[in-house]
Amino acid sequence: MKHTIQERQARAGWLFLSPALLLFGVFFVVPVVAGLLLSFTDFDVYGIGALDTVRWVGVNNYTGLLHDPDFWNALRNTMIFVIAGGPLSVAVSLGAALLLNAKAARFKPFFRTVYFAPVVTTLVAVAIVWRYLYHPHYGLLNQGLSKIGIGPVDWLGDPHFAMAAVILVSVWKNFGYNMLIFIAGLQSIPEEQYESAAVDGAGKVKQFLHITLPGLAPVLLFVGITTMITAFQLFAEPYVMTAGGPLGATRSLVLLMYEEGFRWWRMGIASAIAFVLLAITLAATLVQLKLRRQAT
């Protein structure tokens, strides 16, 4: 009888899960499998009209990427964004969270709203504002630099500054989300630990190093991984602000994948880029998890 009840409960559980599993399969598993199969073909715009023109090319799309300078340039730009923009975004988010969580801070709900507002702001509107700020002649940023004797900088038109400009916009737009996560993590650390450390003579720096950071370890791991994954998916900022220029200085892997798939209709190559990016992201995530386990 007991075994029958457990079987009924199991069937009921699968019955309730079936709609979600069906949607997951239709909108995630099927597209992923289809994309993987496409990456081994030369599927292009002609294949849309006649599937019999599609040929199986094996790993040629992947080996072709290894000899494509545009791919390596996009990979380099993406890694620059991940290595520079990811840690900077985490640091800014943590700094803002510490400021808002401080006892001396006032109007906390107001500033949380202000700092989180860019996250929910439309990227096109953000790009228009920042393009004006970056304008080489009339932008407020160059106006400020002129006050200290620095000449105008073509932030979005100079290959040496374009990626830095994109990173700054991305950090400004996205740091508010991680800031709220850090605030929740800070509020979960018992106040008694800080009080005991203060009694023992520990200053603010030691409290931060020995109480705050260890207490935020799980949050830092989560924020670090999610920020890194998001950074690997860089697309909207360069697409809207620079279209991958100048001279390909801001073209990311996702932007290259978009151009191959939806500008030149080379879906096979675009799918190959997608799975290369998936492999790189997965490897980087596993490395970060391993480093975290070794640190603990």
Image: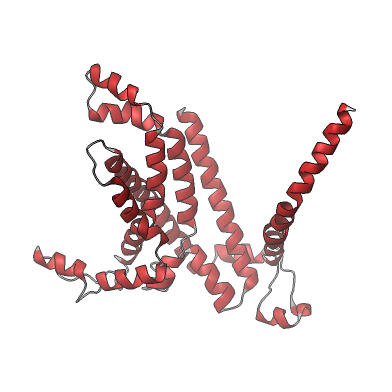
Residue drawn 49% across the image and 40% down it: 288
Q: Is residue 220 left or right of residue 114?
A: right
Q: x%, y% of residue 294?
A: 49, 29
Q: Is residue 146 above or below residue 96?
A: below
Residue drawn 89% across the image and 32% down it: 4
Q: Which of the 4 image quadrants contains residue 24?
A: bottom right
Q: Nearer the viewer, residue 36 or 191?
A: 191
Q: x%, y% of residue 276?
A: 58, 58
Residue 197 visible in this rendered orientation of the protein: yes
Q: Is residue 100 left or right of residue 120?
A: left
Q: x%, y% of residue 39?
A: 67, 65
Q: Is residue 201 left or right of residue 284?
A: left
Q: Is residue 223 above or below residue 164?
A: above
Q: Nearer the viewer, residue 235 or 273?
A: 235
Q: Nearer the viewer, residue 130 or 289?
A: 130
Residue drawn 41% across the image and 51% down it: 177
Q: x%, y% of residue 165?
A: 31, 64
